[in-house]
Each structure stands twice: as structure tokens, then as C-alpha cells.
Amino acid sequence: MSTPTSASERFAYERLAADIGALIQTGTLRPGDRVPSVRRMSTSRGVSIPTVLQAYRLLEARRLIGARPQSGFYVLTPEARAGLARHAPTVALPEPGAITTGDLIMRVLEMVANPALVPLGTALPAEELLPTRALARALRGATRPPLGGTSTLVTPSGAESLRREIAKRSLDAGDAVTPDDIVVTCGCAEALSLCLRALTSPGDTVAVEAPAYFGTLQAIEVLGLRALEIPVDPETGISIEALEEALGRTKIAALVVTPNVHNPLGCVMPDDRKRELVALLAAHGVPAIEDDTYGELAFGDVRPRTLRAFDSAGLVLTCGSFSKTLAPDYRVGWVIPGAYRDRVLHLKLATTAATAVPPQLAIAAYLASGGYEQHLRRLRRALRGTLDRFSFEIGERFPEGTRISRPAGGFLLWVQLPDGIDTVALQRHAVSRGLSVAPGPAFSASGAFPNYLRINAGHPWSARTEEALDLLAAMIAGKSRRRALTRG
Amino acid sequence: MSTPTSASERFAYERLAADIGALIQTGTLRPGDRVPSVRRMSTSRGVSIPTVLQAYRLLEARRLIGARPQSGFYVLTPEARAGLARHAPTVALPEPGAITTGDLIMRVLEMVANPALVPLGTALPAEELLPTRALARALRGATRPPLGGTSTLVTPSGAESLRREIAKRSLDAGDAVTPDDIVVTCGCAEALSLCLRALTSPGDTVAVEAPAYFGTLQAIEVLGLRALEIPVDPETGISIEALEEALGRTKIAALVVTPNVHNPLGCVMPDDRKRELVALLAAHGVPAIEDDTYGELAFGDVRPRTLRAFDSAGLVLTCGSFSKTLAPDYRVGWVIPGAYRDRVLHLKLATTAATAVPPQLAIAAYLASGGYEQHLRRLRRALRGTLDRFSFEIGERFPEGTRISRPAGGFLLWVQLPDGIDTVALQRHAVSRGLSVAPGPAFSASGAFPNYLRINAGHPWSARTEEALDLLAAMIAGKSRRRALTRG
């Protein structure tokens, strides 16, 4: 963990932030001035780099300073304070179309599964941040045969003990459900796939986010569906205005949306936007599949509410997972399918029949033991630290003009490289050097985001991550130079 | 286990069979004569009922005697010895059609998942016959984190250690495959579903067996496919002649077939029929999905070869499972997709992404430990005993005119009741009395087999199974009487 924990450093970052804040407010540091570098401040104050970063992040959150890649932190101008640089907005496709990026996505997914590669391209936090031992204990406990035999536990909706725990946790997300409202699935992937099948027929159009999680795009592709891209604002989530316009001119069978901790952007939709979105969907009678995979990893003081929490019509189907917070290898996810429960259960039976029982029992026992909340608090704090560190290190290494997302949760960074850099070519090159990265076009049904990368920042800073980022930066610099030469 | 194991009974059944065989060969017992009843023989010889049944089964296998329901065993006539009574052949549907039994199948599947019911309707052997403790030990072993972390094991094709063991076992089935040819799935259900999706598009026609496993029919239904029923001979499997005729007049996208230990018939296709079937499919370029779920449970001296063993074109996709032989609750199956490997892997990624890892590692460790062959030998012997016992007890209780299948493996009985008995009504009645049975029409795309039941005989005889069978027989007798009254 890069979060300061020693007694002397515990409040060091707050003192440091207060000191620099005072320098700005008194005009000692003026708009546009460079703030002392992180390394210099670390040396002069005798505190760790993570401590300085945490201080600077606090000042960033207060909109006093901002980062410029390869240059460091600067005091914000009044204009910049009014609205921080955003990603260029994505343009919605004029018409729905078949997904053209299937092969690319497949290549990305295969690469992600390659254990030889440094995992900058995956979307899993470092294993050392997960409660691997406690879960292994729970799994050992789950091998004791229950009364009535284990085969009585092989039911399509999943183990009752696990559904009870999921129902309890849903309360925190503003949703009141019973265990019977929940279907346990083979990871969130199956949940998304079942929902798509429950709501659509081949040839139908599904509204998707741009950018969107490539697994969702692939599920849409293999079901023979068409995708209509709706832009996502990096701070407030999917554009309700663009969706409304699309609903007016196209028949849309369903929307797939990630209101909490978007993948890859990391943003959380404000509650009023969620309310507005649900109202729009209800007005058009269009159901939404809510991907809440990262909902538990939002950094705010309270867990953000799900879209379902605002839905009274049963039109929102919420999908979740324990893969990002507990055990990627257990493949346990779930869906709360609202009004579509019977149809989803029917499809589950006809597709995988039931979810593996021992991993369900282990997670249920772990959750019931009460350590999950504390683990989540620690995990979020650690991920906030690793995100800060990766943002900083990327800023130090990547070319001028690079923009980095500022996630409100999770551990993924969405990085916009200067125009003209082809991240698909970069990915091929990176794979040949043992590095995995996820290129921007894999996050779009139409191959948009050619100069974007998603980078997994869920790993504590180490010699290995440093080496990987150095290598990636060198490749990008090479491509930048070649591009400049070609143009010149 | 109902197989005799005490020292004094070990060879008692062989001595008994030899004694009665001598009586028949010397003409002391003549064609049509009743053989002494099982109960009487048990008392007079001082051996257990299973021992007598095993002796009578041996004589049955030698075609010296045959059973008549509610009447006992008789010395076969020369005509009867030439060919034992078969089920009425099923008529193929004239045209392919949508599956009309979806709701019924759903009801059957839901009932199967209800642990309150005596499981005459499920297709799982009694838990006491499975190596539950050895697997629990293996699962505990699988909780030790591997080198490189568990997340490296989350791959779409499955754990390498498990695929290696499956590849080794495939050799016994006459198939030479490498671990890379195998994709591990969330039970055989996912394997079947992935194969169907790899080979078809909605609206296509799939040739299915009649009768067929209802899970397959349901998978076909939810994918929007049409089914064309091909009759299955209770001794030699699917009718190649009927399939050839169907191929001549209808465009068929794929065949789903169960050559080894058919569900519900229990038959094993002879090798020459398998060879003939593969040649026919190759001539028409039609791929086949082979359901080999019960292949390891065939009673013969050698494990029957898979259809794939005769296939050189990669047109056969073979699906298997550990649910019937090791652990129903682990949900681990696999597919060897031949020429369709990339497509199946792509679909797997887009559907469940990967299979839960700990159950895979546990099964791989159990298989590598070398106890599986011995377990299978014991399990087959036990199931042969429970099948004998259930056949006998059904014969004692069910009305005249009842015919019972003689399975070549597994633990399922396909029971033909007298004409006019509606097993769908019977099932509804049985469920209300806490009994699960699987009605014939659930095994047909078109609702055929109205007077058939599939009965799970994979449970050692006990007070509970006896009570269940008594209750079922009483219900059937009631329906028979009502039918007679209505007609009279």
C-alpha cells in the first residue's frame, strides 16, 4: 500500500496540503505558478512520495492545483478552476450498427488471460490487496458437507445463504430486495449475457456507452445485436441528452449502462442524473442493464446508490460481482433482474444450469463473518493510493498533450495520448515485449478512441510496475517521434 | 450398495445363476415356465435379494430368462430369446418445428431443484456413492495459493492441470487430444449451449433424438432454434436411416446425439453404428454435438468409444461432465470442439469468461491422485445393483403392460406405462405429494411419450425409496382405475 500509515506520516499530508493551500490563498503562489515537484517536496519535508501525492490530490480535489503531464503540478487559473480539462466528448453514432471491433476485443481478451504479461491491460487489482487467506479458510469450511447433501444446493438461482448476504448489502446501495429477487451467476459476465438475452432478439439495437467495457460489447456482438453508442461525460456519466435524442429516432431494445465507477472512465453518476435517467427510460418503456461491478469501490464516504434504487417499474436489471473485491478466480457474480426475474432464471437454467457451489458458500461465509466492510475500506484506500501514484508516474513519463482521467473509484485509468498515436499498433508492439495494455478502440463498438489506453493502476508501485511503465512510455515516445518524422 | 459384498455372498449369485441355468438347459424349467420368485429364492437360499437379482440379471444378459412386470421372471421362449420386447419406435416429426414443451420442461427443471422432493425425477446418483470426502480434501488442497497468484488461472479455456487430465482420459474413449483442444465449461449445460451457439443461428433446424435429454431441448428452445426429432432405438441408439432420410429433405444445421448411455434410454451405440453415423454426417457436412455426460458410466468391460473417436474431419464436438461421477455441485464440464475450437472459446469468453477455478483444481488433483478408475468401477457396480433393484421393484408394483428399459449404463430407467396414462398429470399430482418424477413429454420437442416416465434409480434401496415407489405406484394405479372407469 502506498497510503502513509506510519504514526509520523499519518497527518503529514493534511499539514502539507494546508501549508501549500495557504501559499496559494495568500498569493505567494499565483495562478499558473509551478508547485514544488513531488520529489523535491518529499526530500525537503522528509515524507514519502505517496504522502506528497495525497496532499496534492487533496489540493486537486479542492480545485486549487492541477497536473500537467511531464511537467508537474500548477496553481489553477480561474478559468481552469471553473472546469477542469475534460476528455473530448464522444460523438454518438448517427445510426446503430454491428460491432466492428469483435476481433480486436477478442485479441485484447486473450492477451489479458496471458499470465506471462505485465498486467497493465487487465482489470483486476493486485492479489496482495485481496483477502486471499480469509477466503481460502472460508472455502475450506465450505467443504464440510451440509445437512441434506450438497446436491440440494445445486439450484439455478444460487445458494440461499449467499443470496441473503447480497440482499443485505443491496440495502447500502439504496435497494430493498429479498433473496428471491437475486440470481447468482458465473461471474458478472454471465449476468450481463443473461440480461441481454432476456431483453433482446438478434438484430435488435442496444444502446451502449462510449467508451464501454469491451466484455459488454463482445457479449452484444456474439448475440447478433446492433449497438448504438451514447457518449459518456467523464464526470457525470452517460449523456442523458444524447440518449433522449437517440430514443426519439431509433427503436432501442435495452440500454447497458455503468452508473457507478464507470469502466474505463471511473466516474460516478450523481444521484439526480440517475433519477433523470430512470425517468427517461420509464417514459419510453426501455429496460436498462446496470453494470455495478465496481460499485463497492467508489471512493466517497457512502456507497453510491444503484440505478435500481431509483426504479419503481422493475425496468432496471442490476449486475454485480465479487471478482474485483474478493476473488477473481471464484467467478461469482449476480443479477437482480427486477420484472425479468423468471425469464433470466429460465435462461440461466438453459445455459449453465447452476453456479459452482463451493465458491458461493465460501463467499457467503466470508460475508457473514463480518470482515468485508473493513476489507473494502482498506482496499479503497489502497487503490486511491495506487491510482495517485500511477497518475503521477504516467504524467512524468508520457508525452506532452497526454490527459489522464481522475477516477471516483476503482483502479483503472483512461489515458488520452496525443492525436495520431495508434494504440492498437501500440498494443501489438507491447504484447511482443511481454506487456499487456488495453487499446482505446476495444472500448467502442465503432473503433473510436484510437489514441486512448486503459491502464490498470490497481498494483502497488514496485520495480516491476515501474519497469512496465518505463517500457510503455518508451514505446509511446518512439511512436510519437516516428509520427513527427512522417509528418515532417 | 446393493451389490453383495460379504464373504459368504461374494460368489453366491454366480452359483445361483449356474444352478438355475442348469435347470433350464436340462429342460427341467421349460420355455414360458416361471422362475422361482426373487423373495422365495432369497429365503430358501439364505442370500440377500440383491444377490438373487444379480443372478437373475446374469441369466437375463445370457438371454435365458426375462422379466414380466408384476409377475416375475420366466424362461424365455425361442422367439423372445431372438429379440427382447422393445419400446414402440418413435415416429420422426414430418417437419421441423419450434419446441412446444418449453413450459413443461421448465416446470420439470424447477421441480428437480426442489430439495423437499424424493428425487425420482432428478438425474444425479445418491451422494453416498460419490467420493465426497476425497474431493473435499482435494478442494482444501486447492486453497493453497499457487506460484504467480490465482488470477493467472482465470483463463477462458480452463486450468491447464485439469485439461491435461481430461486429455489423458479421452485416450480411453479412443480419442487423441491435447490439453489445447479442450475448453472447460460451467457444467455440461454450458458446453452444450456453447456448441449450439457455435453451430447455429436463430431459426436454424437442429436434429434431436426422440426421446432426448430435456436440458438440450430447453437450450435449443431459448436459442430460437427449430427441432427435428429422430427416433432412437432402445438398443442401438439414434436411427441412422431416419436421420439420412431427414438430411435428404431438410437443411439441418447440427445434430445433438448421445451415443454412449443415452438419457433417458440408457443404450450405447455399437461401434459400427457410430462409424456409419460419422460417415453420414461427413457426407452431408453436418456437425454433431455429442453429449457424453454418462460415457464413463457404461457397464461394459471397456469404456465405449466416443463418436469423436471415429471422426477425422473435426465435425464432432464432444461434451463431458464430472457432475454424474464426482461432484454435481462443482459444476465442471468440458467440450472438445474439434474444428470449432476458436468459435467456442470466443463464445465462452463472451458468456461466462471463465469457469470457477477452485473446483477445477480440486478435480484435477483428485484425478491426478489416481483413485478415479477404482471409484468408477465401484460406482458402476453399485449402479448396476440399484438399477436391478429398481427394475425389480417397479415390476412388482406397476400395472400390467408396463415396460422398463434395460440400460447399458448409468442409473436412469425409462418406463412405459399402459396407454392412456397421462404422466404430465401424474407429475403434477406427484409434486403435490412431495415426489419428483420426470414425465415423458419433457423428453420430446413435440410432446411425445405421454405415457412414459424417467425414474432415477441411482439410489440404494431404502425405506425412503420404497415409500416413494409405493406412493408412485398407488398414484398410477389410481389413474389406471379412473381411466378404466371412464372408458367403461
Image: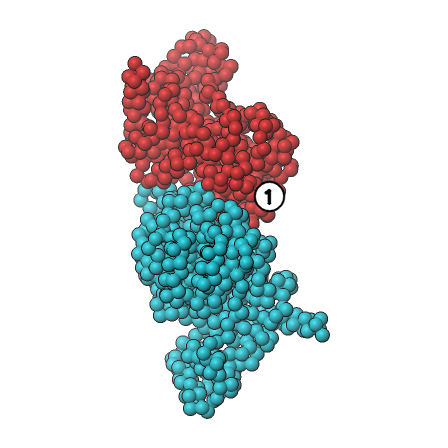
Chain colours: A cyan, B red
Foreground residue among A136 and B217 = B217
Tell me the residue at 43%/77% (across/down). A61
Tell me the residue at 35%/64% (across/down). A373
The 10 Å Cα crowd at callout 1, few under 14, some 14 to 19, many 20 or more, is some
- Residue B433 pos. (x, y %): 28, 32
In the rendered image, is residue B327 in sight?
Answer: no
Quadrant in which the C terminus of chain B is drawn = top left
Foreground residue among B144 and A431 = A431
Tell me the residue at 43%/33% (across/down). B100
**Dot 1 amino acid type:** Tyr
- Residue A153 pos. (x, y %): 36, 45
Q: Going by the image, does A215 lie left or right of B131? A: right
Image quadrant in which you'd find residue B54: top left
In the image, residue B140 above or below residue B102: below
In the rendered image, is residue A392 in sight?
Answer: yes
Q: Going by the image, does B423 lie left or right of A45? A: left
Foreground residue among A269 and B439 = A269
Quadrant in which the N terminus of chain B is drawn = top left
Image quadrant in which you'd find residue A488: bottom right
- Residue B203 pos. (x, y %): 52, 38
Q: Going by the image, does B440 lie left or right of B282? A: left
Q: Element type at marker 1?
A: helix
- Residue B294 pos. (x, y %): 48, 35
Label 1, on which residue?
Answer: B340
Tell me the residue at 41%/65% (across/down). A269
